[in-house]
Amino acid sequence: MKPKDLKLPFQWGEQFITIQDKVFFTFEPFDKKGSDFDFPGWGHPEVFGNDKPVKIEYCSGNGKWIAERALADPDGNWVAVEKKAARLRKVWAKMKNLGLPNLFSICGEALEATKRFLPGATVDEVYINFPDPWPKKKHAKYRLIQTPFACELARILKEGGTVSLVTDDEAYSEQMIDVFSSHPCFESCYEAPFYRGKREGYGSSYFEDLWRGKGKPIRYHLFKKVGSGQ
């Protein structure tokens, strides 16, 4: 099945909040269609239908990394979060072509979808692979990794849960370290300088392959939730 063969459950411009075919379509503003929609929980039959560990990847892109992880880890429930519908279709197609009942997708903006819908203290692991670095200084305010998002991750993670972040952008790496090191619920699993240049068994993504092929260094960060406060 090709991504273009997968049809959205609505016409663009008339979208609404719904879960169909293991995809959760969320759209802002939430005060319009679907404002009364409540996420049914990870154990609901339309989501995973079990209580296995939940592992979320934000910024899933074409789904290469998460599809490989879901295939290798059938005892984990994997969640792909991607804002762009065209990319989401690629994740969706991989889910169907590879037969992955343990892969669920969320089409929506990471911070707002998490804040509005995801239940607290229910997630075991979070992965954020190559989020848009917005490299120009005037655009840095659009970066995903900022204090409000860290607070939402602290809310949805179980105590002891982890956040893995990967980037090729040095300035963004320093921002990631600052945001999570400053949050009272997180501590780095790596000693200073709080990142590593490789992580065995992590898997590869489109952007990792791209940047490594161009000789760019990659930084891996790992933080653990150590407290229940926010």
Image (spheres, grey):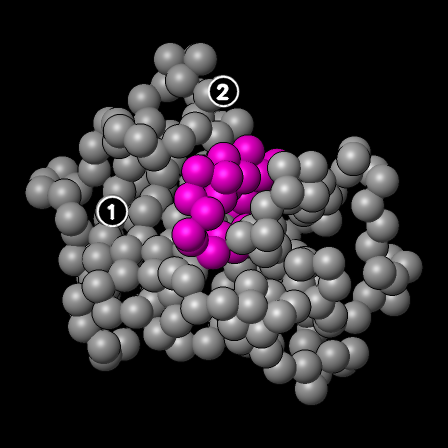
**Quarter of the figure with residue 56:** bottom left
Q: Which residue is mark 1?
A: 222
Relative to 224, is 67 above or below? above
At 34% from the left and 67% from the top, the residue drawn is 157
How crowded pointer 1 is (Cα within 10 Å; few <14, some 14-19, many 20+) is rated as many
Q: Tag 2: residue type?
A: Leu
Relative to 213, is 200 above or below? below
Magenta part of the chain: 59-80
Which mark, by number, is residue 210?
2
- Check disc 1 and report its element: helix, strand or loop: strand
CA gap between label 1 and label 2 equals: 22 Å
Q: Residue 225 appears at what percent x and percent y?
A: 23, 64
Q: Residue 174 appears at what percent x and percent y?
A: 26, 43
Q: Residue 213 appears at what percent x and percent y?
A: 44, 13
Does the image show residue 199? yes
Does the image show residue 185? no
Instruction: Judge from the rendering whether residue 226 lies leftward or rightward of residue 133; answer left or right.
Output: left
Q: Tag 1: residue type?
A: Leu
Residue 70 on the magenta span: yes
Instruction: Judge from the rendering whether residue 155 lies leftward or rightward of residue 192; answer left or right.
Output: right
Q: Residue 135 appears at what percent x and percent y?
A: 46, 37
At 59% from the left and 46% from the top, the residue drawn is 100
